[in-house]
Image (cartoon, rainbow, N blue to C red):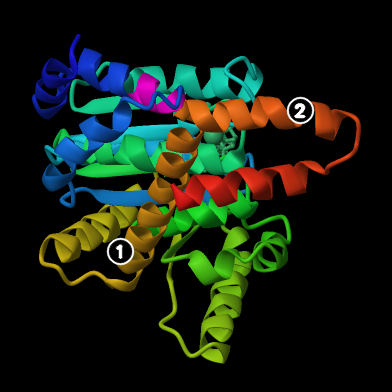
Amino acid sequence: MNSQNLIRGVLKKDRKSLGRLISMIENRDPGIFPILAKLFPKTGRALRIGVTGFPGSGKSTIINQLAKALVKKKKKIGIVLMDPSSPFSGGALLGDRIRMREIQMDSGVFIRSMATRGKMSGLNLAARYASDALDAAGYDFILLETVGVGQLEIDVATACDVTVVVMTPDSGDEVQAMKAGLMEIADVFVVNKMDRDKEHVYFSRIKKGLEMHSELRSRKPAEVLPTAALFGKGIDALTKSLIGFGEKKLRGKLDGDRESIRAEEDIKSCIEEIFIDRLLANSQIEKKIKALIPKVKSRKQSPYEAAELILKNGIEK
Ligand SMILES: Nc1nc2c(ncn2[C@@H]2O[C@H](COP(=O)(O)OP(=O)(O)O)[C@@H](O)[C@H]2O)c(=O)[nH]1
Ligand SMILES: [Mg+2]
């Protein structure tokens, strides 16, 4: 498939084309940049929702339910599951696959799990580019499930319009969540596994804690919603809230700060990609690297000094 056909396919929501493009993104194929540039004017409509929280809190279950609810409302849903460990991580991902199969049959839903070789930041970027592809293809909502609650998750939050943080009522999660910085990034807190009445005590406590936290930082408190996703409870309210965010985005009323941050980060990361690609593709540079290998090997020069030397010439060019 040449890139013209690939672009045309993506814009027509052809699954094969989308799959192909996302594979290219995963493999860091340099050919993606001209394609993404062509798709870029078609992006900006989809609401990008990051779903984060501790493993086992119910993110996949919630996403599954949300997708079903949104499809009923005639929305097109893209789902990106991030799995940095490996494509063969077994258990968790397999479970997700089975659960997701139910909704994958629906033509309004496109699901993809992503793994990239190498750095975590590579995964963050890949998820971002995959979201662009899905956005251009006309998906209304893009749901991004992160794997844990580390820096990657926080980075992903800036890549999304809305961040949903999932907690459970029984685990001291709120303290952990605060430690992990999740309070700062949440737009919506979902307290999942609210299966039993007694859990309403925890819910009130979490809610009060969150309100206090935002008061201390004089920012608008995040919405706090109870769910029992396994039983489909509370999903309507969550769906309604997300549709509200989506409408706000289409009216240009969503907080523009995140888009500014995203634009800045995107420009910077493209500089990084382009710079490194061009530099390493340059035969002069390659020669210089080769020439410096013996010096570094024999410890006459540090790799740092060698890199400085090469970069100095590279930039001058
Ligand atoms: N009791 C109960 N279990 C739930 C609920 N939501 C999810 N689970 C279960 O919790 C486990 C982890 O859910 P999963 O969606 O895979 O969590 P993730 O790791 O955050 O994606 C699974 O066994 C789910 O069936 C809920 O509302 N109540
Ligand atoms: Mg999951």
Task: Please identify, in this view, whether the residue under mark 1 or under mark 2 is nearer the observer.
Answer: 2
Give residue 293's mark: 2
Q: Position of residue 72 (x, y in %)?
A: 17, 36
Q: 134 or 237: nearer the eye? A: 134
Q: Are marks 1 and 2 in contact (CB under 8 Å)?
A: no
Answer with left or right where residue 23 lies relative to residue 15. Answer: right
Residue found at x 11% / y 37%: 74
The residue where tag 1 is placed is 259
Q: Residue 78 colored magenta?
A: no
**Image point (63%, 58%), residue name:** 169
Residue 291, compared with residue 211, is above or below; it is: above
On screen, 130 above or below 155?
Answer: above
Alpha carbons under labels 1 and 2: distance apart? 43 Å
Q: Image check: 39 left or right of 182?
A: left
Amino acid type indicated by mark 1? Glu
Residue closest to the eye, 63 or 121: 121
Question: What's the amino acid at mark 2?
Answer: Ile
Q: Which residues are magenta?
A: 22-26
Quarter location, residue 87: top right
Q: Is 24 covered by the magenta stretch?
A: yes
x, y (%) of residue 235? 35, 48
Asked if residue 66 is positioned above or below residue 259 in the image, the reply reads above
Q: Secondary structure at mark 2?
A: helix
Front-lying residue, 28 or 177: 28
Q: How many marks?
A: 2
When the figure is inspected, residue 20 is found, relative to residue 40, above or below; the finding is: above
First of labels 1, 2 by sequence position: 1
Residue 287 x %, y %:
59, 26
**Which residue does the image show at 37% across and 27% down from the upper left?**
30
Q: Is residue 305 left or right of residue 310?
A: right
Identify the main secondary structure in magenta. helix
Q: Residue at x 64, y 16 (%)?
A: 90
